[in-house]
Each structure stands twice: as structure tokens, then as C-alpha cells.
Image (cartoon, grey):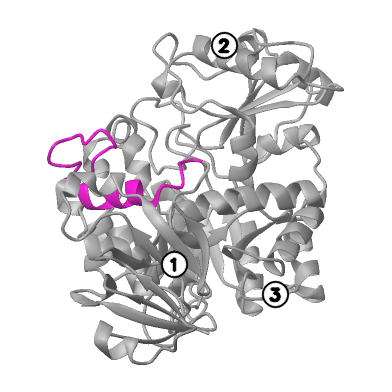
Amino acid sequence: MKQILFNGKIYLNRNSFTSAILIEDGLILKTGSDDELLKLINIEDVKIDLKGKTVLPGFHDSHLHLYGSAVAFQSVELYGLSSKKEIIQKAKDFLRDHPIKDNQTLIGRGWNQDHFIDDSTLLNRFDIDNISTDFPIVFSRACGHVVSVNTKALYVLGITEETDQIEGGHFDLDQNGHPNGIFRENAIGLLRPLDISLSVEDKIHLIRQISQIANKYGITSVSTNDLTLGNKEAQTLEAAYQFISKNKPSLRVTHQVCFSDLEDFNERIQKVYHLNENEFNSYGPLKLFIDGSLGARTANMRTPYKDDPSTSGIQCMSDDELKQFVSLADQNDISVAIHAIGDQAMTQVLDAYQRVIHKENRLRHGIIHCQITDKALLHRFKEMDILAYVQPIFLHYDMHIVESRVGKDLASTSYAFKTMEDLKLHVSYGTDSPVEGLNVFQNIHCAIHRQDLKDTPVNGFYPLEKVDLETAIDNYTLGGAYANFQEKHLGRLLEGYKADLVIIDRDIFTCEPSTIKDIQVELTMVNGLIVYKK
């Protein structure tokens, strides 16, 4: 049985539209005019009258934490709170409806000290103790690169001033030399015993829930960093993803895979890296972390932070270890995608890539975030054809801190979306959820207007780095497909491509530009099947 969508405005390519699209067995058979395609269907075939609505390819979020988002949405949401007092009250309110049992851990995420009006210091154990000291509490900063815990958590874990610091990370000490509950970068791994262990069935439920939310925003495929193989939770999480992929999936999933150490990576390669793959569950790049976040001042910079000269960030992995990971991946035809935000972190990554990329970047190695750059760094991207996994939505918050963190000169060449296009880099967009929400259109707003979600500044933040609408859409569709070697069958609404598409409630190409961030999805289709309908 065929399906036809007709009487619409269907985006094919820049300045190219059609009114109808014919689908069979999950593939686009043909695009064309209503008259042309309506002649090709039978009475039993499905007709969908678009009534003039605009249709776009399904969106690909090129970097997020899908399962992590599901867990975050089930915990105490601390996003946007403006004081430590608010955080304490929000947690107490949460506990009234979700009482802690059997000394389990209370999890929360989203606090940001830059929003605090009462005390702009990082959340510490003394603050969180005001919620409770009866059970462990673990509250992650919005970026996930700083985590704060209460005194009970330190006691359960046995962490004291005698505990060794972790290479590539740090836990802070108070004025008396005792741990104050603040953990940065690799030191966050010390908190892993407090993780709540869930069954495969629990994880299936959470992944289905978050997939439905993604579908609501028009997301049909994702590249997700959830799996850390060698971690005890990875086996059940892999099983959950594999089960869903074979039982009514609504989202194409490509994993950006972390490993506990080089030995675990090598062991996986020797067994089989691409385990039980299908079109809804595939294993993509090796994912590495080289530094932290700008907001937490753990992004690794060449020079000290302007607003805190005591630090230039944290290097989370040594040069030698990085080169060993990259070499092992490249030798085994595995792509690499590396988290790097600071200019020094990107220099470190590019140096490692330069050792394995000779004539061309055949494995499409890339850098995730690519925030603090100068022109020389971006030209190095071009020289090696390094992929840029970009999150324009980060500007919503970062534009308010970046100049104070790194100075105006470096800020002016950072988040360089237009420069990346002028250099013809391969760029893909994403959200890094749960760092930011899954809303595609807010992300596009930040890319094309370079404004926060309150429409400031009026002319945009360093407006010469704005991209046009078609570029933003293509980076959110075809760009993500390219990063996963899928550009020949995903990311466009052309003959032979998968029927992954979204119908939106207004014409994104002609509506008032300031309302783009308010666009809603009316229908999402994956493989020709409706997975969301408003």
C-alpha cells in the first residue's frame, strides 16, 4: 500500500520545493505535482491532504544523551532556578511526591551558578545538606561537568581529605581541607556507586518516553552518547536499545560510544564493535572527552580565564592516551568524535587527528561543540576536513558569559557558525540534551538570529556569524546524516530516500522570523509510519 502527501509545500533543497510526495515501504518513490502523483495511487492507498502545510525532512540531533535526558526528566529539574534557596525548596517539594526509599539517591540536574542572585558560588554540600542529610543527594550542573553532593553522599562513598585526586578531574576542598561536595570532570566518576541501578525493562520504558518527546519536536534520528562500555550499567542499556530497535522503534539511534579505558576499547574491537546492528540501532564513533564546559570554567583554554585567572580549565585526557585511542580507532576503521570546547582542547584534538589523517578524512573524524575558536583553528578544521558537531542553542546562555570568560577578541571568533559555512566545513546541529532541551526550532532560532530565546540582543550576538535558514535546516538534517555516512538515504525528501519527515504548523520560510522558535510539529513520520501526531 502506498501513501501520498499532497497539496503542500515540501522542501527538497535550497530554493526547491514540490507539492506532493509518494511513499511505499518506508521509501520515497517519487516527488512531484499533485496531478502527477495522484494518478499513481489506487483507491486503497492512503491520502494525506497537507492543506498547504510545510513539510521538512526529519531532524537529526547529531549529539545528545538520549537515555541521560530520560533520566534527567525523571529527576529533580533544577534548570532556570535563580537561587540556592529555590533549589532547596524545589527538592523538598519533589520529595513530598517522590519519597526516598531504602537510602536511595536523590538525583537532580540543571543548576547554574551564573543564574543565582543570592550567591554566585557553586552549589556545595553545605547548601545541599539543607535538603537532607539522611540519604545521598547528587545534583549535576546544567552542563554535567560539575556535580555537587551532600555530606551523606561523601560518607557513603568514603570520600575524605585522604582520598586521592583523580587525573583529569578534581574534587574541591573547603577552607579546612575537607571535601566540600563539588566534583569536576573525571572526579565525577567517584560518584558512580551512587547511580540508581535500573532493569532492562525500566530502561526500555525510559527510552520510549524520551523518544516520544523527541518525535514531538520532529526528531527522527539521533546520535546519542549514553554507552560507556566497561561500565556495569552498559550491558542492560545496550540490551534496552537493541530490544526497542526491533520492536516498534520511533527513532533511528546511532551510538557515540565511550569506553572506560583503552583496554576495554580494544576488547570490544576484538569481539565485535558493531553489535546486533540494524537501521534503528547502530554503532558510530568512538566518543572521547578532552575538557569540560565554559560555564563551569573547566573548558581547557590556552590562557587563564579572564574572570578567574587561577584556572585555564581541565585537560581530561593526556596527549599520549588521546593519541592511542585515536590511532586504535583509525586502524580499525572506527570514526572518532571528541568533546572539545576550549581552544587548547581543540588544538590537542587536531594534533591527534593530524597523526592519522593524511590525504583525506575518510572516517569523518570530528569535534563535538567547537565553541571557543580563533580563525587559525577553524582553518585547521578545513585543512583536515574535520567534522563540526555544533549546538547553536548554547548561545542562549553562553552569549551572556563568553566575553567575561575569554575576552572580547576571542569571543568575536567563537561560535563561528557562518565562518564554518564559508570554509565549507561539514557541520551538523544538535542540542546536547539534557544540557539544553530538545526543541529543534529554538536551536534554529539561535543559529539564524544569534539571539537568546528572549530575542536579545536586537541585532544578534556578533551578527556576522549568523547563518541563513536553509543552512540551519540542512545542518539539522543532511549534516547529521553525513556525519553517520547516511547522506545517500537520509536528510532529504528525494526519490530513494527514507520517508522520515515532519509537517509543521506554519511556513518556516515565510513566517515572521522572530516566530520561528515557536513553530510546532503537527506530524512526524519515520520510515513512512506516523510516530507523532499533534
Task: Please report the bounds of the magenta region as a residue range.
Answer: 435-462
Amino acid under disc 2: Gln
Q: Residue at x 27, y 82 (%)?
A: 34
- How many discs mark residues in the rendered view? 3
**Residue 307 placement, left or right of 362:** left
Q: Residue at x 73, y 61 (%)?
A: 262
User: Dot 2 surroundings within 10 Å: few (below 14), some, or many (20 or more)?
Assistant: few
Who comes first in sequence, dot 3 or dot 2? 2
Is residue 130 one of those drawn in magenta? no
Q: Residue 302: percent from the left, percent from the top?
A: 40, 44
Amino acid under disc 3: Glu
Q: Residue 475: percent from the left, percent from the top?
A: 35, 65
State the predominant SS element of the stretch in magenta. loop
Q: Residue 348: percent from the left, percent from the top?
A: 48, 56
**Residue 101 placement, left or right of 518:** right
**Residue 138 placement, left or right of 383:** right
Which is more toward the observer, 488 or 191? 488
Under circle 1, the secondary element is helix
User: Dot 1 surroundings within 10 Å: few (below 14), some, or many (20 or more)?
Assistant: many
Q: Is residue 124 above or below residue 407?
A: above
- Give the residue furthest to the left: 459
Mark 3 lies on residue: 277
Residue 480 numbered tag: 1
Amino acid under disc 1: Gly
